[in-house]
Image: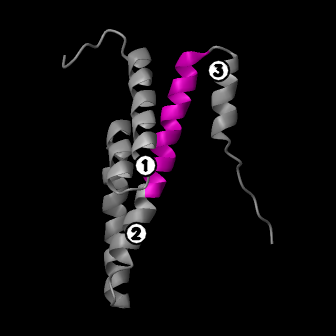
Amino acid sequence: MHLSFILINPYGDIDKAIQARDWFNGFAIAVSYIEHFGTIKIKRYLDLRILRAIDNLKERKRVRKQFKDDLGKNLERLSAKDIAFLLYAFQLVDSDTYLKLRKIITERNKLVHPARKGIG
């Protein structure tokens, strides 16, 4: 059997950007990881809470296919702020972590959209 994998080191990627004083990429990478891993965490949570709660195995299989299609499409549309909020609302992160995630996202947005002030 052959097993292959990709090792992802969020801290390493972010640390490299910090050491290079590349703030834009550091914040962009951090928010990308929040979106990527946050989405995975939300999908797993919903799978456990909703799908596995269906007792009838046949019905669970039918719902699971449609649920995964719908969930994947809908989660892709969420902003990083929405993902952070859902992580907190589902109690997947504590309030301190939620506030830190929001701060990172806010700082990234200032770098990405420097001219944006409120609703344009």
Determine the residue positioned at 43% across, 49% down: 94
Tell me if label 2 and label 3 are in contact, CB under 8 Å. Answer: no
Residue at the extreme right: 1
- Other residues around mark 2 within 10 Å, as few (<14) / some (14–19) / many (≥20): some
Q: Which residues are magenta?
A: 22-41
Say which residue appears at 70% left-offset and 25% top-offset: 16
In this view, 38 is above or below 19: below
Of tags 3 and 1, which is closer to the observer?
A: 1
Q: How is the image coloured?
A: one colour
Calculate the distance from the C-alpha at mark 2 to the C-alpha at mark 3: 36 Å
Query: Badge 3 is on which residue?
Result: 18
Examine the residues drawn in magenta and state their main secondary structure.
helix
Packing grade of label 1 (10 A; few <14, some 14-19, many >=20) is few
Judging by the rendered image, the residue that carries numbered circle 1 is: 94
User: Which residue is labeled 2 in the image?
Assistant: 47
Give amino acid for label 3.
Answer: Ile
Give the distance between the C-alpha atoms of the residues marked 3 and 1, in whole angstroms: 26 Å
**Are the residues at dot 1 and dot 2 in contact (C-beta closer than 8 Å)?**
no
Foreground disc of the pair 1, 2: 1
Q: Earlier in the sequence, mark 3 or mark 1?
A: 3
- Secondary structure beneath dot 3 equals helix
- Magenta run includes residue 74: no
Query: Mark 1 and mark 2: span between their CA atoms?
Result: 21 Å
Horizontal and vertical percent for residue 95?
39, 44
Location of the N terminus (image quadrant): bottom right
Extreme residue toward the top, this view? 115
For label 1, the SS is loop
Upstream in sequence: badge 2 or badge 3: 3
2 lies above or below 18: below
Say which of marks 2 and 3 sits in front: 3
Front residue (pair 119, 73): 119
Q: Name the disc covering residue 21, or none.
A: none
